[in-house]
Image (tube, rainbow, N blue to C red):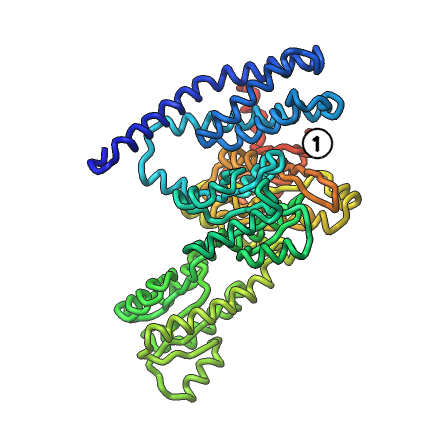
Amino acid sequence: MNKNQNPMQKDRMSTDQTLNSLFAEHLPDIIKNIQFYKETIFSQGWDSPAVADLYHLTHKLVGSSGVLGYQQISLAAKVIEEKIDPENGQFSETLTKEAFEGYINALLEAIQTDQSVLRELNKPVSKSQMGNVERASKLIYLFEDDAIQAFDLVGQIENYGYRVKVFDNLDLVEEVVRQRKPAAILMGIDFPEGRMAGPNKVADLRARGDFRIPVIFLSTSDHFSLRLSAVRAGGQAYFIKPVDIISLIDVLDRLTHSDQEEPYRILLIEDSKFQAVYYAQILENEGMKTMICTQPAKVLDIMSEFNPDLILLDMYMPDCSGMELANLVRQVERFVSIPIVYLSAEQDIDIQLRAMSHGGDDFLSKPIKPDHLFAAVKTRIIRYRKLRSFMLRDGLTGLLNHTTINEYLEQELARAQRQKTPLSFVMIDLDLFKQVNDTYGHPAGDRVLKSLSRLLKQRLRRADVVGRYGGEEFALILPDTPGDNARYVLEDIRRRFNKITHLAGDQFFSVSFSAGIASYPEYATANDLKEAADQALYQSKHAGRDRVTLIKPALPEIYKAEK
């Protein structure tokens, strides 16, 4: 224990651990009681005493789970509590059994999810592990006094990798922000304190102190005065309920910088190791990744492995001149567009221009100031990445296009073969997507495509390759991933995607997908992987859709006979 730790803090930590343990012990019994009450109500109807029992159970659950910070359980329980409140005498006429069962299932799912969280909480956690948890999901505070809307919004947002904590009391804003600063705040407009209580609270906090947290306002009204109050309070966005979740996630990503750009990658080709290391250090100090090549004969292999955004090339080397090497690189189709910048002590303008005509994009003279080198390299790479994005990516989703995903598959498979590591290739197809377009319109269909593409990017690793293969079909390349692991990952993504609610006008709908997986070394070539994954996808569709199939090579007949 920290010697400086307040004894009251120690007692509070001990009490919290005890409460967590007690809560965890009671969860299995709570689940059984909920299931029993549900079945009893289904068999006896709304007049059953089980309705009152369930009401009291959910009422207690709202408080206990809320105190311990289990927001999903608390919100799901509060929805049921409000729906079957005895003071709401009309609920038996308005609440259908189908809707009631849906609320019960949502509560049971929330409890099952948080049971695993409780098991982890009761284990000792290292500081390094805590750091990983913190980085894994960004914290969002939601201030909303409508429990049903809050519950729905939390489930939707958390599917995209954020963690949401809900509060229904505006007086808590300053306290909870002081205890822990969130990445952003979602703030309602109307509260019991007044019609513009949300913006007024935020404006007051900004006026009194250093309150720079991004705030997004949520409202049922599009009235100009409300929008103006949100702007005056420093709100960065304003959404009308029901919220278009994809648009909200777009804004959250932008405000919290969720899509961190890959570091710029520079290949330095230089016969002087000392100079190469010097320039590499300058660029790495600015957050760039570098690779040094002092042997021109190895440059193509290094480029295939490193995939540079730019080449810094010395003009004069013993075995091969810079101009010769630039010409050689330009004759390889996949390297035609990579910027080549000469970095040389050559001062003769005519020679510099001749070098530029041999595949070069720019010429920098040594010696060069570090900030000048960084600025020149950064400017070239930004332009290159933009142009490359137009060529390689799908315009709607921003994912790699069909041609590019096939090229990446060849590259990643070659790497897996060299390093003797597994690789999985996945084909995904949205189920009944034509019906979505026919029923809700193509703009709604486009939003579904963007929703899945965003979910894939957020749930997969940076090393994984995500592409739109065409139409409603997507392709994934998962390096260092055996088939069983890939299936586990895809099942998680499939379940999350099923929970996402899409909005078209005033209509809500959900969409599922089917997936097929094939893996290396079970399938040894890119064509074999694609054909096998496509066959696995067909099996998923044929088996009823909304599922993931991992295909394995058929055993030889003689082996099957022996088995």
Q: Mark 1, residues whose alpha carbon is within 10 Å: few (<14), some, or many (≥20)?
A: few
Which x, y percent locates residue 475? 60, 46
Which residue is painted at 51% across and 42% down in the image? 170
Q: Nearer the viewer, residue 55 or 553?
A: 55
| Figure quadrant of the N terminus | top left
Decide if residue 287 is on the left or right side of residue 497. Answer: left
Q: Nearer the viewer, residue 532 or 390?
A: 390
Which x, y percent locates residue 149? 62, 37
Which x, y percent locates residue 513? 65, 38
| 558 versus 204 height, above or below | above
Q: Nearer the viewer, residue 343 or 510?
A: 510
SS class of the residue under badge 1?
Answer: helix
Residue, far front: 193
Res. 474 in view: no
Which x, y percent locates residue 554? 58, 30
| 326 versus 407 height, above or below | below
Which residue is painted at 60% across and 33% down in the image? 549
Q: Which residue is mark 1?
A: 542
| 282 versus 110 height, above or below | below
Residue, far left: 3
Q: Nearer the viewer, residue 89 or 273?
A: 89
Amino acid type at circle 1 is His
Res. 263 in view: yes
How many numbered marks appear? Answer: 1
Residue, far right: 438
